[in-house]
Image (cartoon, rainbow, N blue to C red):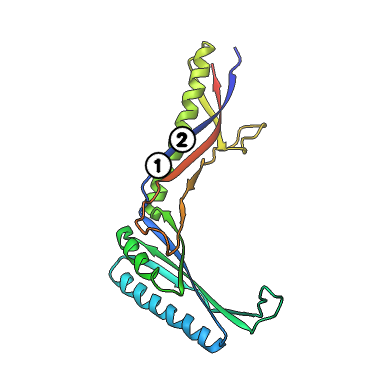
Amino acid sequence: MRDVIITVRGEHQTRVAPEEAVARLTIRTEGEERTSVMTQATDAASILRTALTARQDAGEVREWSTGRVSVRSERPWNNEGKQLPLVHHASLDVSATFADLDALSGWLGEVSELDAIHVDGVRWMLTEATRAAVEADVSANAVRVAMTRATAYAAALGLAEVTAVEVADVGLLGGGAPVAASGPAPRMMMAASPMDAGVSLELQPADIVVTAAVEARFSAR
């Protein structure tokens, strides 16, 4: 009897509590005097740098970065169609990765009280070591699901011996001769929380969803 070829898809998903968080902030200032606008932006940036450096030294912040001050000018119009005096705008992006989530909550509460600083959002993450371990586990479980499905199909056909022929990321399983197996591709869904100074800063991080799916081909006899 010729072997029966069984092609299946295996999927697995798990949820993991975040270990780190990336806070994104923007410094924004505006006014009629360009020099004053620039000074306000650089002063706010200096406050953030000092605070972040101290928290990094304390082990609460893993890394942080700031961009360059960007300045633009415009002449707005009023409701009567009259062009108003020139207004200058300065902005600067800031990003900080917190290893201590409790410290992040307190820090956001502090900086959100400053007029020039706007909290754009928080993205929850896993450490590199945890992410690699979770992805490996989810990928392995996706392969096991595929094997279980193939075995069930074979049993329904009265076949007992099932052998893996191909395993590939979804969409990569070829229709020709068997090829070397490739690793399944796990995917992480990381929650990003928009925020501003007018909302509660009691952070409730959402679990990170890690999923993996594979396509596999088996021979059964």
Mark 2: which amino acid? Answer: His
- Relative side of 90 to 95, left or right: right
In this view, 217 is above or below 132: above
In this view, 209 is above or below 147: below
Looking at this rendering, what residue extends furthest in the right direction?
A: 81
Element class at badge 1: strand
Q: Residue at x 58, y 37 (%)?
A: 170
Quadrant that contains the N terminus: top right
Q: Residue at x 66, y 80 (%)?
A: 75
Q: Nearer the viewer, residue 132 or 177?
A: 132
Could you tell me residue 42's position as x and y percent? 46, 82
Mark in front: 2 vs 1: 1
The residue tagged 2 is 12
Q: Residues within 10 Å of mark 1 (few under 14, many from 20)?
A: some
- Relative side of 47 to 164, left or right: left
Q: Nearer the viewer, residue 84 or 141?
A: 84
Q: Nearer the viewer, residue 48 or 200?
A: 200
**CA–CA distance between discs 2 and 1?**
11 Å
Could you tell me residue 30's position as x and y percent? 54, 79
The residue tagged 1 is 15
In this view, 37 is above or below 25: below
- Relative side of 147 to 127, left or right: right
Could you tell me residue 198's position as x and y percent? 42, 62
Checking the image for residue 110, the label placed there is none
Mark 1: which amino acid? Answer: Arg
Element class at badge 2: strand
Could you tell me residue 64's position as x and y percent? 42, 69
For the residues labelled 2 and 1, say whether their Cβ atoms are less than 8 Å apart.
no
Quadrant that contains the C terminus: top right
Q: Residue at x 44, y 44 (%)?
A: 209
